[in-house]
Image (tube, rainbow, N blue to C red):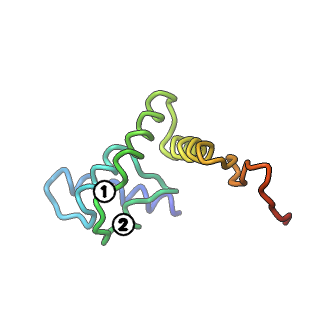
Amino acid sequence: MHSIAYNISEIRTKISRRFGGHISLNSSFVEDLEAGLSSRNFDIISQNSKDVRSGLDENTKNEIKKIMDSENLSFDKARLQYTERQFGKNGIAPDGTPMDPKAVTFGK
């Protein structure tokens, strides 16, 4: 059900933008949406309607776009790939646990 609502909202936003209609996203988020940088799991349509920030971080979205293009991945998978790479650069395993051998973690 959420998928249908998301798709309808995305289509309505794109049509409204194309024909000069008013949309509730600021123009930076609309550009991100049109570039494919939104998904059911990362919904910039409904979650940012009153957001005054200037869209997504330029460096991050450029890197995610590169991953999408070079590895032929969806936005969500490219975002995961980017996040896991950032984790690795910061000594964090893909599952979010520290890779520092001196780190102490507690079981579940």
Q: Which mark is residue 48?
A: 2
In the rendered view, tell whether residue 13 sits above or below residue 65: below
In the rendered view, tell whether residue 8 sits above or below residue 80: below
**The quarter of the displayed image where residue 36 is located:** top left
In the rendered view, tell whether residue 82 sits above or below residue 24: above
Measured as percent of width and height from the top left, residue 64 is found at: 45, 41
In screen coordinates, is 32 left or right of 100?
A: left
Measured as percent of width and height from the top left, residue 23 is found at: 23, 64
Query: Residue lying farthest right?
Result: 107
Q: Tell me what residue is drawn at x 51 percent, y 35 percent.
A: 73
In the rendered view, tell whether residue 94 sits above or below residue 72: below
Measured as percent of width and height from the top left, residue 48 is found at: 36, 66
Marks 2 and 1, how far apart at CA: 8 Å
Q: Tell me what residue is drawn at x 72 percent, y 53 percent.
A: 98
Three-letter code for the amino acid on which mark 1 is drawn? Phe
Measured as percent of width and height from the top left, residue 43 is found at: 44, 59
Binning the other alpha carbons within 10 Å of mark 1 as few (below 14), some (14 to 19) or many (20 upward) gives many
Three-letter code for the amino acid on which mark 2 is drawn? Asn
For marks 2 and 1, the one nearer the N-term is 1
Front in this rendered view, residue 94 or 19? 94
Binning the other alpha carbons within 10 Å of mark 2 as few (below 14), some (14 to 19) or many (20 upward) gives some
CB under 8 Å between discs 2 and 1: yes
The quadrant of the rendering that contains the C terminus is bottom right
- The residue beneath circle 1 is 29
Query: Residue lying farthest front?
Result: 102
Query: Residue lying farthest bottom?
Result: 50
Q: Tell me what residue is drawn at x 53 percent, y 43 percent.
A: 82
Q: Secondary structure at mark 2?
A: loop
Q: Secondary structure at mark 1?
A: helix
Q: Tell me what residue is drawn at x 27 percent, y 49 percent.
A: 31
Q: Which mark is residue 65?
A: none
